[in-house]
Amino acid sequence: MTNNVSLPLLGFAAFSGTGKTTLLEALLPKLTEAGLRIGLLKHAHHDFDVDKPGKDSYRLRKAGASQMLISSRNRHALMTETPESEAEFDYLLSRFDQSQLDLLLVEGCKNIAFPKVELHRKALDKPWLYPNDDNIIAVACDEALDTELPQLDLNNIDEIAQFVVAYVDLERIKHDNPPSTQQKSKPAECCDTLSPATMSVTQGQQKILSLVEQQVSTETLSLKQCVGKVLAKDIVSPINVPQYTNSAMDGFAIRSKDIGLASFEIVAEVMAGHAYSGEVKTGQAVKIMTGAPMPADVDTVIMREQANEVDGVVSFTTDNIKAKQNVRSAGEDLASGQAVFTAGTRIQAPELGMMASLGFGQCEVLKPIKVALFSTGDEVLEAGEEQVANTIYDSNRYTLFAQLERMGCDIVDYGILEDNEQVMIDCLEKAASECDMVITSGGVSVGDADYIKLALDKLGSIDFWRINMRPGRPLAFGKINEKPFFGLPGNPVAVMVSFINFVEPALRKMQGEENWQALKVQAIAAENLRSRQGRTEFSRGVYSTNEVGQLVVRTTGKQGSGILRSMSEANCLIEISPAVDTVKEGESVTIIPLQGRL
Ligand code: AMP
Ligand code: MG
């Protein structure tokens, strides 16, 4: 379902010509009579415009206002230009002031998943939508039909209105008393259930983040050892940058009061790393190099290209000299005592260079997170060993190793866990006492009878989740001896996708990056992308820019969750939200670029 609506949402789906608008026009008075305040979302063709050429608002919009709000005593309308791509359904719904409405009706948006009534007129001889669309909850037609769905008379507005009013009542009851499996309404608490629960990707992420805490141990390392680590304390500049006022150009330094004089006697020459401490009087200049300190009396530099130097005298070929030009003041970039970086900043090339530029030789950073890594499964064989019948080589521990390594973790590799419940319990408890986090892969599917699951069950504080996503539906999460535990699925691609979505954000929080969020951008689908309503689909994608500079994305092809090569070919994940079943070629879709993350 869509994320942004707390109101009942109902659509009307039909082929054009069925009379959707005429029906809605007749229906609305009946609904408002019944006390419902209605919001209506209508999808129109891309060249549609609410405005008229020649009107002021139209002219101002065309002149460059990307948002135009026009208001009068009786109404206002906000027109937002979206030339790049059409706004997403969820976003559009969020534009309504839902506190002022009881029901949101939608006309159009055929390929978006939300409850709809199908309208069908026999005379038009169009195919039915409901047999292929689970979102259709009723049909309104003018013929007898063999279906389990509620049937309404297309020409009986009162009957349709009654259906809509009853639908709103039912939705309100559902909303006020959500079923107990709905995690959303429960407070986030640890280990609240051992029974399988279904949750969205966001719910899973939020729950995990609410249960992991930031690392507190710190260490002081020499600067070069800090690459990829996270600052434990705020960094305040101990010096002025630049340290001294200096010239920004190779040229001639003069007193600004002398601007306009015809020529200047050159009294000194200053190179970078040197200084001139003598006087500079009216009518005198100092020849100066970029970065050299400005002598005390001068404050303006004219660049060499605008100067004529003959026998120790310089004149300038430009009339356009401004006082204090081409001079960098001491502390202009950063004053001594000014904040530079806050604790929680990850140290990469710019931060490292910046800290060096401030004279820091070492730095206090958070200690790396120590992660225990296991594989499980009778069929799993250590890489490098001779192949045995009915086995697969353990790849998950290697992918995870590399992903953890990239995150700057200390990894303790516990190998492949023996299929013995007591051995597993002992190993997991030992790992949790020695490390800050424990990760396993395999054996956590609901219904699996793997030993790992029995062992985790006995440990007592692990939940088995079913996340509404593909790949990566099963996920075990909880704590062993207060240390976060992740039981990732077994499928190699699912392992990576689960790591990206759940483990990495948790690690980043533990490492001190408080509000880290994965980069997500919009790209145009270069092919039809299929998903299923109600779950988040993460396809492996390849994005690029097309001839006109737009970001476009295609899939890597076959999307089986065991095909690790598809991860290698991909440079992004394509994220199709649960509200959408199909993204058509040319439509906009969310991508998560993977550069720097794998
Ligand atoms: P499971 O979740 O245990 O049912 O595993 C799902 C699939 O992932 C099975 O085909 C397993 O053989 C495979 N799998 C499990 N663990 C690993 C591993 N460490 N490396 C590669 N594949 C694995
Ligand atoms: Mg297994």
Image: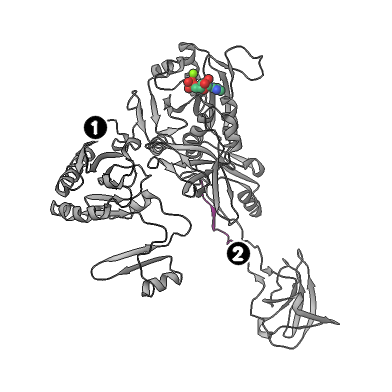
Q: Is residue 148 inside the magenta stretch?
A: no
Q: Is residue 5 visible?
A: no
User: Which residue range is magenta in the image?
Assistant: 331-343
Q: Residues within 10 Å of mark 2 (few under 14, many from 20)?
A: some
- Under circle 1, the secondary element is loop
What's the mark number on residue 83?
none
When the figure is inspected, residue 471 is found, relative to residue 284, above or below; the finding is: above
Q: In the image, what residue occupies the spot 64% across and 80% down?
A: 322
Label 2, label 1: how many angstroms apart (C-alpha)? Answer: 77 Å
Q: How crowded is the residue under tag 1: few (<14 C-alpha within 10 Å), some, or many (20+)?
A: few
Left or right position of 151 against 383: left
Which amino acid does the dot numbered 2 rest on? Gly
Quarter of the image with the N terminus in it: top left
Question: Residue 39: x, y in percent?
Answer: 26, 54
- Vertical order, 279 against 243 (above or below): below
Q: Position of residue 482 (x, y in %)?
A: 42, 27
Q: Is residue 153 left or right of residue 587?
A: left
Which residue is drawn at the image coordinates 76% and 69% (left, top)? 289
Which tag, 2 or 1, sits closer to the chain's start?
1
Quarter of the figure with residue 530: top left
Q: Which residue is mark 2?
A: 331
Amino acid carrying label 1: it is Glu
Determine whether the residue tagged by mark 2 lies in a helix, strand or loop.
loop
> Is residue 468 something one can see in this rendering?
yes
Dominant secondary structure of the residues highlighted in magenta in the image: loop
Q: Is residue 368 left or right of residue 100?
A: right
Residue 108 at x, y = what percent? 33, 50
The reply to whether the magenta stretch includes residue 332 is yes
Q: How is the image coloured?
A: one colour
Q: Where is mark 1, residue-wise?
A: 148
Locate residue 397: give its quadrant.
Answer: top right
